[in-house]
Every structure is written in structure tokens, then in C-alpha cells.
Image: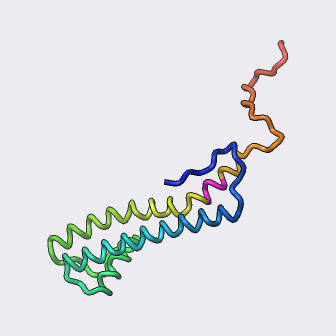
Amino acid sequence: MWQFEHHSMPLLPWRLFLRRLATSAAVGFGMIVASLAVGMAGYHFFEGLGAVDSFTNAAMILSGMGPLLQPQSTGGKIFAGLYALYSGLAVLVIAGVAFAPLIHRFLHRMHAVDAGEQDEPAPIRGQNRPPL
């Protein structure tokens, strides 16, 4: 999806980093809106709930709190179970998408090569020992 800079490249300037962060936050927000729309449609179709009740149940399941109204139909129960399983994974994916630029910048900063530093491998332990 996105191409992050290699660890041998300099850190992204703040302006571009903030743009990347805003983009990933927008994608994460879009994923939340899409997930809520699917949940609302499912509750409306299977349980005949209105917009507000459908939103509340979908939001509660997506956030991990659980539904307020228990499904009454078999289709509604199956949908609620599948939506709960989806929501558990969606929260992890959305958090990964939203926080990826921050985590990448932190790791990149830790591994960035200084301008004067040679990119040589670290010596093997005990390699520079004097003979006994």
C-alpha cells in the first residue's frame, strides 16, 4: 500500500511525515465508517432495527463492548456472531494502519545511519581477542 523509506535513507521531513500520518488516520477512519455501515445494514436487514439502534449495536460490537439488544432471529444471531468475529480482527487492522507511520518513524530513528558512520557489520563476539 505505502512505501516507507529504507533505514539507510534519512528520516522523512516533518511536513511529509504529518501528511503520511494524516493519510493513514483518514484510511483508518474510513475503515471504521465502512465497518459501521456494514454492521448497521446487517442489523437493519436481519433484525429490522432502526438507524439509531442499528448504529448503537454495530458501534458497541465494533468497540468490543458487546451488543445492547440481543438478536431475536436466527439470521440476526448468525450475523451478530460473524460481525463480532470480524470486528475483533478489524480493530487490530485499523490500529495497525493508523499507527504504522508512528511505529515506522520510531524504528527508523533508532536504526538510521549517521552521515559519517560506516555501514559495517558489528564485530563477532570474541573476534578481537588477543591470543592466550
Residue 35 place in picture, x, y as percent: 36, 70
Rendered residue at 66%/55% (across/down): 106
Residue depicted at 20% across the width and 71% down the height = 77
Q: Is residue 102 left or right of residue 110?
A: left
Q: Is residue 31 above or below residue 10?
A: below
User: Horizontal and vertical percent for residue 65?
Assistant: 39, 74
Q: What secondary structure characterizes most of the magenta part? A: helix
Q: Residue furthest top?
A: 132
Q: Which residues are magenta?
A: 102-106
Q: Is residue 29 left or right of residue 43?
A: right
Display colour scheme: rainbow
> Where does the C terminus fall, quadrant-wise?
top right
Furthest toward the left, the residue is 74
Q: Answer left or right for 118 relative to 5.
A: right
Q: Which residue is painted at 50% across and 60% down in the image?
A: 97
Q: Quadrant of residue 22?
A: bottom right
Q: Compared with residue 2, is residue 70 higher up or lower down, i.e. above or below?
A: below
Please say if 8 is above or below 71: above
- On the picture, is 44 further left or further right than 119? left
Q: Closest to the observer: 59 or 32? A: 32
The reply to whether the magenta stretch includes residue 70 is: no
Number of numbered discs overlaid on the protein picture: 0
What's the residue at 59%, 51% (across, down)? 4
Instruction: List x then y, in percent, for residue 20.
Output: 59, 62
Residue 7 is drawn in which quadrant? Answer: top right
Q: Does the stretch in magenta take in 103?
A: yes
